[in-house]
Amino acid sequence: MSLYEYLQQSPSYFNSKFLIFLSIWFFGLGACVGSFLNVVIWRMPRGKSVISPPSHCPRCQHKLAWYENIPVLSWCFLRGKCKGCQLPISVKYPLGELLTAFLYLLIWGKVILNDEPLFFAFNYLSVTFFLIAVFFIDKDHRIIPNKLTYTMMIFGLIFSAFFPQVTYIKGVETAWQGLLYSFVGLVAGGLFFGILAIIGELIFKKEALGWGDVKYLAAVGATLGFPGIFFTVFFGSIFGSIYGGLLILSKKGTLKTFIPFGVFLVLGTLLWILAGNYIFSEYIALMESIKIKSI
Ligand SMILES: [Zn+2]
């Protein structure tokens, strides 16, 4: 069986031993991806290359050997200090690796529960890489780098051509249809929220919805199909409002306090990946029960 055919299979096709092996593998993969994300989150908003130079200590320039670069474990056996100059290494690095690892495991668990084809896991996990980067960069720097959103869009277009079903549209089967519907998702997100951003700016005389957010939503449309965009905006707004409300209640902010919306959009997208189809079907069942009662 080719890798492509393998990726078309859903978890029920494999025996439980292989699924356990895959779970450990995804956890490890998440830790490694988290390690790379630490580099991306630190360097990208500072305009530095994420590839070179290789990881080194910012004080003594000590280059990390391979065994000092193992996610989580290296930090533990180095006891959180640089081997060269004893400069403390922040605990947020191993925590970022663990967070990504657990998130990868959680998403893989969801794929098993829903018995979705393996390529869905591949799509979700790739998208999650961008989500985590957007979350932390927007939180700390209030920007969503174009490099992230554009790469996510290109990934979505190419991946949808190979696996058209990820567009969530029934009957989309050929590569051209996949590419087309991914493109439709991209344009739908970009155009709809782009217009909304312009209207918001005209009404409020300030940036209500940033262009980084608009590009992010277009990228969500390209990778997760356009149902994902509206889910993201709906729940992102709810999460953002709750956070804003809590800030005001705790007197740490006012209605004018800036809230990085991208952070909450990411939470909305994550909820879509983890429980979107469940919430969607519950919602439809609820609507139908209301309809039946009213008849
Ligand atoms: Zn050092």
Image: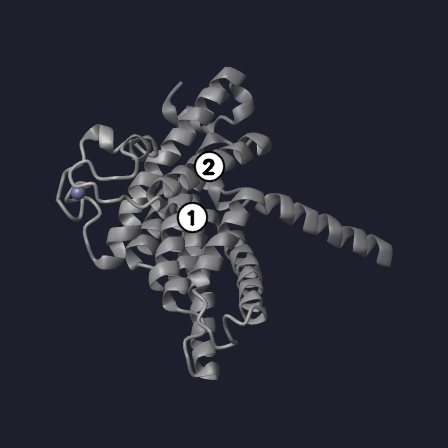
Q: Is residue 54 left or right of residue 81?
A: left
Residue on which the image places disc 1: 223
The percent coordinates of residue 79 (x first, y second) are 30, 35
| Residue beneath the point at 49% across and 21% down | 20
- In terms of image quadrants, where is residue 51? top left
Count of numbered circles on the image: 2
| Residue beneath the point at 44% across and 71% down | 258
In front: label 1 or label 2: 2
Q: Amino acid at mark 1?
A: Thr
The percent coordinates of residue 181 (x first, y second) are 45, 50
The percent coordinates of residue 123 (x first, y second) are 42, 40
Q: Quadrant of the C terminus?
A: bottom right
The percent coordinates of residue 138 (x first, y second) are 37, 60
| Residue beneath the point at 56% across and 23% down | 12
Farthest residue to the left: give it: 61
Q: Amino acid at mark 2?
A: Phe
Depth order, front residue of 192/94: 94
Helix, strand or loop at label 2? It is: helix
Farthest residue to the front: give it: 86
- In terms of image quadrants, where is residue 262? bottom left
Q: Quadrant of the N terminus?
A: top left
| Residue beneath the point at 21% across and 29% down | 66
Helix, strand or loop at label 1? It is: helix
Q: Are marks 1 and 2 in contact (CB under 8 Å)?
A: no
Above or below, comparing residue 68 to residue 12 in the picture: below
Res. 288 in view: yes
Residue on which the image places disc 2: 102
Q: Is tag 1's residue or tag 2's residue first in the polypeptide sequence?
A: 2
